[in-house]
Image: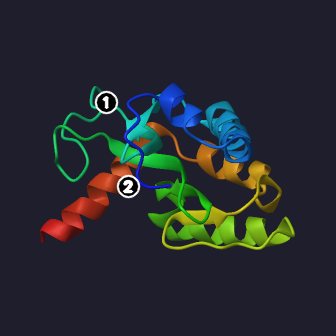
């Protein structure tokens, strides 16, 4: 699937083939169940995203006042489905926990910097994904982002 032009989550889900839609909906339900208070669901970068809303951090992502900070994203790519876990990518301790928990699940981890790729829902340990998402309160995540960006500006 090319980058979606869908404006709403409903539109995004409607354009997916049934098997992919079911997988995305199951992961979405896990995310929503575990998402700490303060984050918001929206469409961003052609995917379903969970962001720090501008009302909580008006400076925006990388100080772009129009773009909320992405926390998690969920998308159907051309050859795979993906969950993007910015929280895991941005924290060494959480990344180590995540890798170990994933391995313990018995499922094979196919991950880039923040992108966890999977072909079928059965390949994804939803409990590990949910636990990773639940671990980072919004104010903690904002602090991590500010710290990382201050290093870039030096």
Please tell me which residue is depicted at 76% across the width and 50% down the height of the picture: 126
Q: Which residue is mark 2?
A: 144
Residue 94 visible to the viewer? no
- Mark 1 surroundings within 10 Å by alpha-carbon count, few (fewer than 14), some (14 through 19), many (20 or more): some
Using the numbered discs, state the Cα–Cα distance from disc 1 to disc 2 in whole angstroms. Answer: 14 Å
The answer to whether 64 is drawn above or below residue 102 in the figure is above
Local secondary structure at mark 1: loop
Q: Residue furthest right?
A: 106
Q: Which residue is mark 1?
A: 56
**Residue sitting at x 53%, y 50%:** 75
| Element marked by disc 2 | helix
Depth check: give the residue in front, 48 or 35: 48
Name the mark on residue 23.
none
Q: Position of residue 82 (x, y in %)?
A: 58, 58
The number of callouts visible is 2
- Decide: is 138 above or below 62: above
Give x and y (percent) for residue 124.
Answer: 75, 58
Q: Quadrant of residue 5?
A: top left
Residue at 57% x, 32% y is 14
């Amino acid at each position: 699937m090319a980058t979606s032009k869908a404006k709403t989550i409903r539109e995004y889900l409607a354009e997916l083939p049934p098997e992919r839609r079911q997988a995305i909906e199951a992961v979405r339900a896990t995310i929503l169940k575990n998402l700490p208070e303060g984050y918001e669901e929206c469409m961003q970068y052609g995917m379903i995203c969970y962001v720090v809303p501008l009302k909580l951090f008006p400076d925006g992502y990388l100080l772009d006042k129009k773009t909320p900070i992405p926390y998690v994203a969920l998308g159907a790519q051309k050859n795979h489905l993906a969950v993007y876990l910015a929280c895991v990518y941005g924290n060494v301790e959480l990344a180590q926990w995540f890798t170990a928990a994933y391995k313990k699940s018995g499922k094979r981890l196919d991950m880039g910097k923040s992108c966890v790729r999977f072909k079928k829902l059965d390949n994804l340990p939803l409990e590990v994904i949910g636990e990773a998402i639940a671990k980072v309160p919004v104010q903690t995540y904002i602090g991590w982002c500010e710290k990382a960006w201050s290093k870039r500006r030096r």
